[in-house]
Image (spheres, rainbow, N blue to C red):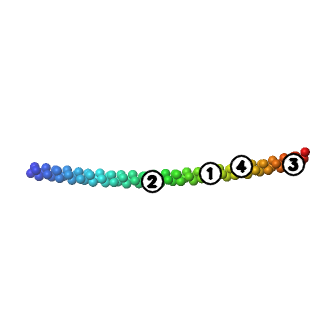
Amino acid sequence: MIERMEEQVKNLTRSYREELNQIEKSFDAERNDLLESNKKKWEQTMQGRRDKEIDNMKAREKRVDDYEQQIQHLRTQDAEEYNMVKIKLETDV
């Protein structure tokens, strides 16, 4: 009778260990899925941020080019006005 009880205890212990291992494997699998999901979300967020930074950089470069063209146009216009005023003053003198 004692041997039978010991055998039952061993069987129950083995069953509980197997069940515990299955639970741990399930938790590990769920944890890995969550980690993978969060990693994908993070990578997507970072890629979106990089894309926005590139767009902002391109927009800034375009503004700088526009400003440089405006400055060059104003320099040319001012130089032409200066020459016209200089010629007028020289002819008036």
State the residue position of label 2. 41
State the residue position of label 4. 71
Q: CA distance from mark 2 to mark 4?
A: 45 Å
Q: Residues within 10 Å of mark 1 (few under 14, many from 20)?
A: few
Nearer to us in this view, 72 or 14: 72
Spot the residue most to the right.
Answer: 93
Identify the amino acid type marked 3.
Lys
From the top left corner, tell me how far across and down residue 19 is, in percent.
25, 53
Q: Earlier in the sequence, mark 1 or mark 4?
A: 1
Q: Which mark is residue 88?
A: 3
Count the numbered circles shown: 4
- CB contact under 8 Å: marks 2 and 1: no
Identify the amino acid type marked 1.
Glu
Q: CA distance from mark 2 to mark 1?
A: 30 Å
Q: Residues within 10 Å of mark 4 (few under 14, many from 20)?
A: few
State the residue position of label 1. 61
